[in-house]
């Protein structure tokens, strides 16, 4: 089992940001500069073609730290960010760009489904190994409640199978922008924790009906669907339940009480 090694550290506006590696996985941990130990830990996934420090993800992470006192972690998916790309990664990216440019919808969907499933198969054990390593840190430990803070597209294509097999995750936020293939629907059926699902109503790449079928598949008794007008990359969220994670994980300090 790989241990976690910090490789860089900065702080600003009350947020401590530490880059780390666990084996070959590159990640970043955000936490309060001063705060109680064993605060809730939120896992955040990034979208396809992006990375762990994408501006939108960083903004959400820093907000969770400053507003709720959470600790937040993000890692680069295989072939993303600071991770090297395999031949499969390079070929899939090239094929996706070619299919999209040619307007080959069915081919684009087929490649996307196959590649995202491959990424999830590789990323789920990496997330679990990262969690193991984080729980060895005294400020986190095994007492900290854990939630999945989502991420559209790839962040959810990985987050759903992760949540389906990882009992340490007790609440999750997912979002649309990906193809809901059968394996993903089967994974959703195994999820019983509270779920908040965000759907771009005018998503231009993905059939809305398949995403609604995915939401329907969650076995959670507490699940909420929020749909706003907008496309894959142009979305302004209104009415989001900002207190979803704090309600289910508790505020910082509650787990240590």
Image: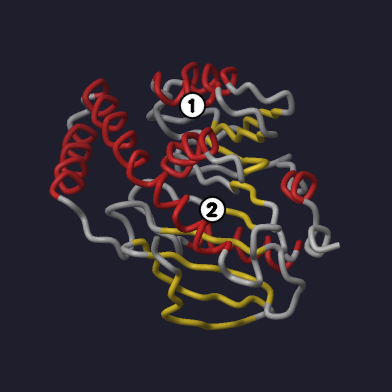
For marks 1 and 2, give the one nearer the viewer.
Answer: 1
Please tell me the numbered disc located at residue 17: none
Q: Nearer the viewer, residue 197 or 36?
A: 36
The first of marks 1 and 2 along the sequence is 2
Q: How is the image coloured?
A: secondary structure
Q: Find residue 50 and report its horizontal and vertical position in percent.
A: 37, 54
Q: Name the residue rendered at 53%, 16% in the picture.
A: 213
Q: Are marks 1 and 2 in contact (CB under 8 Å)?
A: no
List x then y, in percent, for residue 12: 62, 82
Tell me the quadrant of the picture where the C terminus can be found.
bottom right
Q: Which type of secondary structure does the marked residue at label 2 adopt?
A: strand
- Name the residue rendered at 29%, 26% in the picture: 109
Q: Residue furthest right?
A: 257
Locate residue 64: give its quadrant: bottom right
Quadrant of image for the N terminus? bottom left
Could you say which disc has been placed on residue 187 in the image?
1
Residue appearing at x 33%, y 33% in the figure: 117
Q: Position of residue 129 (x, y in %)?
A: 44, 55
Residue 154, image quadrant: top left
User: Label 2 crowding class (10 Å Cα cut-off): few <14, some 14-19, many 20+?
Assistant: many
Residue beneath the point at 46% across and 73% down:
19
- Mark-to-mark CA distance, 1 and 2: 19 Å
Determine whether, in the image, residue 243 is placed left or right of residue 53.
Answer: right
Q: Secondary structure at mark 1?
A: helix
Q: In front here: 196 or 176?
A: 196
* Front residue of this view, candidates 54 and 127: 127
Tag 1: Cα neighbours inside 10 Å, few (<14), some, or many (≥20)?
some
Q: Residue furthest front?
A: 1
Label ID, residue 44: 2
Left or right of 217? Residue 184 is left
């Amino acid at each position: 089992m790989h241990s976690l090694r910090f490789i860089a550290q900065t702080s600003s506006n009350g947020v401590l940001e530490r880059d780390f590696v666990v084996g070959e996985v590159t990640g970043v941990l955000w936490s309060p500069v001063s705060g109680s130990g064993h605060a809730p830990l939120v896992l955040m996934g990034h979208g396809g073609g992006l990375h762990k420090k994408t501006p939108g993800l960083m903004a959400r992470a820093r907000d969770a730290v400053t507003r709720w006192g959470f600790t937040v972690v993000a890692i680069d998916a295989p072939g993303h960010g600071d991770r090297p790309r395999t031949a499969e990664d390079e070929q899939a990216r090239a094929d996706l760009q070619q299919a999209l440019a040619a307007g080959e919808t069915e081919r684009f969907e087929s490649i996307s489904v196959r590649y995202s499933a491959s990424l999830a198969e590789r990323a789920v054990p990496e997330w679990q190994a990262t969690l193991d390593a984080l729980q060895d840190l005294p400020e986190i430990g095994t007492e900290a409640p854990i939630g999945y803070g989502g991420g559209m597209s790839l962040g959810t294509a990985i987050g759903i199978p992760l949540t389906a097999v990882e009992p340490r995750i007790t609440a999750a936020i997912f979002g649309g922008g990906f193809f809901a293939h059968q394996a993903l629907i089967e994974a959703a059926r195994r999820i019983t924790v509270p779920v908040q699902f965000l759907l771009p109503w005018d998503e231009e790449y993905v059939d809305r009906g398949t995403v609604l079928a995915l939401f329907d598949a969650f076995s959670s008794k507490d699940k909420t669907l929020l749909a706003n007008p907008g496309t894959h990359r142009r979305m302004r969220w209104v009415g989001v339940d900002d207190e979803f994670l704090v309600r289910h994980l508790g505020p910082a300090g509650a787990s240590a009480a």
